[in-house]
Image (spheres, grey):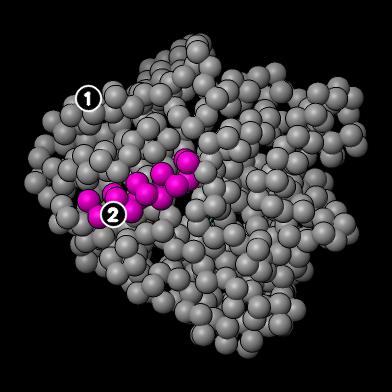
Amino acid sequence: MVELAGAWKASSKNSNKAKIVMDAVRNSGSLYRDGLGMIASENIVSPMVQKVVGSDLHGRYAEGLPFKRYYQGCGDFDTIEDLGINLAKQLFKAPFANIQSISGTVSNIATLKAISNPGDDITAVSTADGGHISHARMGAVGLRDLNLSTYPWNEERMEPDIDASIKLIHDVKPKVALFGQSVFLFPTPLEDLAQAAHDVGAKVMYDGAHVLGLIAGGCFQNPLEEGADIMTGSSHKTFPGPQGGLILSSSKDEKFQRKLNNAIFPGTCSSYHLHHVAGKVIALAEFMEYGEDLSKNTVKNAKALGAALASEGFDVLAESRGYTASHQVLTRHGSLDSGAGAKAADLLEQAGIITNMNMLPGDTKAMSPSGLRLGAQELTRVGMGVDEMKDVARFYSRVLIDKEDPSSVKSDVKEFKSEYQTIRYCFNEDELSGYPL
Ligand SMILES: Cc1ncc(COP(=O)(O)O)c(C=O)c1O
């Protein structure tokens, strides 16, 4: 790690400050190149996406929709965005797609703007049970001034308690019934819940930020077929594109579709980061070719990782359901609110394994939770399979159970990772097949 604060003070020239940034960027790249990136919300982009994200499009504007712009010079970008909208519709079997949103959170803010008014009721998964902060008063739900009621949770199954949630929806009669989580091990039992929501006149919104790639690859659930009116998501988690968002809808109603488009521009974005949109379109094209295999292998690897960690002696959640049906695995490292998850994450980082501490059912303190949330998507992207998940579990065990010095494990992690330096499931270009800067 570059000692930024100290280096900043010592440096009088602005060019030195820029150098500090370049060094830190390079170091951050090395951390992931030599280590195991296992944060469930992250991924690495393909060589072609890397190229497009660094292109001249970065400095351009294209307000409006393809072929209906406020600026000149957008002809080539019209081709790109139009292609991307059509690819997204095809991939998600959706009559509507907007690919402009600059993040999953912005997709949620825009969607809530389109389908609710201040003072309306919304039902969602609580953050304690794995809902995202944008589903909470502190996030997009509060920004839209909605009244939040959270679904009763089935801890054993790690999903909303179906009967009690249907009762909640009948009682509250929300304008929006929001589903989906950040801690997302199993598909939401959506059909009955969506039916209950539609019965009381609610729109059903499904936040697929984490599982978008698994959905596109046919490996999780298909929310738009199971009753969701709108699906939002990030384009950079299990869907392996550049940072950004998407909004998809099962609605063929053009007036409703216009509302969703308007909620992005002019509703929540002016520039919508054209270089990232172009990167999303490349990622969509790559996904059409390789996505099914990538998603299938990601879920297979996550299940294998759960089993391997359990046989090393870790407390892996949801054993009775095979640990996971997504890219995520949850492990508990001590008693509730003990901060054991934070300590484990820190030790693992010292060994070159990048994870995040996470609240598990029963934890109440976000900064001192008992658990870790792990993701298998990035390791899958560089070609690891179920056998390698056993090697990965062994590294965890050496650090956290055998209490080996993390720095000695780190050199073994680096050697292990040196075999996995090519980004797979994408169109590789000769001069650019490996990790980004
Ligand atoms: C369920 C869910 N929704 C939305 C988001 C926000 O996505 P972004 O980081 O793209 O804004 C996240 C982030 O991890 C998430 O887990």
Where residue 421 sits, quadrant-wise, is: top left
Q: Residue at x 57, y 83 (%)?
A: 166
Q: Left of 284 or right of it: where is 352?
A: left
Part of the protein shown in magenta: 293-308
Q: Residue at x 25, y 55 (%)?
A: 307
**Residue 180, position as x, y percentages in the image:** 54, 63
The N terminus lies in quadrant: top left
Residue 249 among those drawn in magenta: no
Q: Which residue is mark 2?
A: 306
Q: Nearer the viewer, residue 90 or 368?
A: 90
Q: Secondary structure at mark 2?
A: helix
User: Does mark 1's beta carbon lie closer than 8 Å to ligand 1?
Assistant: no
**Residue 128, position as x, y percentages in the image:** 43, 67
User: Does mark 2's beta carbon lie closer than 8 Å to ligand 1?
Assistant: no
Q: Nearer the viewer, residue 351 or 93?
A: 93
Q: Amino acid at mark 2?
A: Gly
Q: Which residue is mark 1?
A: 415
